Amino acid sequence: MPSYLLDSGLVIRHLRGQRRIVHFLRGLGKLGRLAVSAITRLEIRAGMAPDEEYPTQKLLSRFVTYDVDRDIADRAGDLVRLSRQRGNTLSVPDAIIAATAMAHNLTLVTLNRAHFEGIPGLRLEPLIENENP
């Protein structure tokens, strides 16, 4: 059973060979199974260059992928609405990623702490770009 849901930024940096992130994710994978949202898969595949298809698919195949179902769609919609009521902006992709983590009782691992802070019920493992995990 997965323990961690990875945000898109971590997967992108892993694909770019950023050693710090590669080592961090390998270590995290020893602690629990890693997963991504279907939205993260979409974002990664949409941004890949033609010569990146094989390594991208190889990396994505290592993660459990959670689809967007009715519960996740409803939760994400509620998160966007609550964010607006508070005067903040939560993007639809980020809301889906957060809702996926919450629906499957996963800790979201992200480099974009500000995008997800303040979401009630979301377990967050934020990383800082220049932090040494």
Image (cartoon, rainbow, N blue to C red):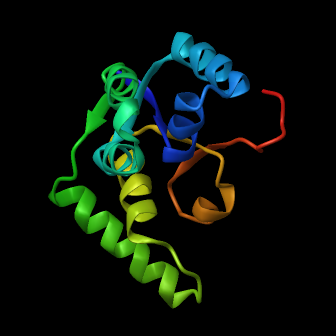
Q: Is residue 100 above or below residue 32?
A: below
- Which part of the image, by quadrant, shows the C terminus? top right
Asked which quadrant contains residue 52, the reply is top left
Residue extending furthest front?
A: 51
Q: Position of residue 63 (x, y in %)?
A: 36, 25
Image side of residue 79 versus residue 116, left or right: left
Q: Position of residue 74 (x, y in %)?
A: 25, 67
Q: Report the number of numbered marks.
A: 0
Q: Residue at x 32, y 64 (%)?
A: 75
Image side of residue 127 versus residue 12, left or right: right
Q: Residue at x 84, y 40 (%)?
A: 130
Q: Is residue 43 above or below residue 31?
A: below
Q: Position of residue 81 (x, y in %)?
A: 40, 82
- Which part of the image, by quadrant, shows the N terminus? top left
Q: Residue at x 27, y 39 (%)?
A: 66
Q: Position of residue 123 (x, y in %)?
A: 55, 46
Image side of residue 132 versus residue 72, left or right: right
Image side of residue 58 versus residue 82, left or right: left
- The answer to which of 17 and 33 lies nearer the viewer is 17
Residue extending furthest left?
A: 70
Q: Is residue 70 above or below residue 14?
A: below
Q: Is residue 95 above or below residue 56?
A: below
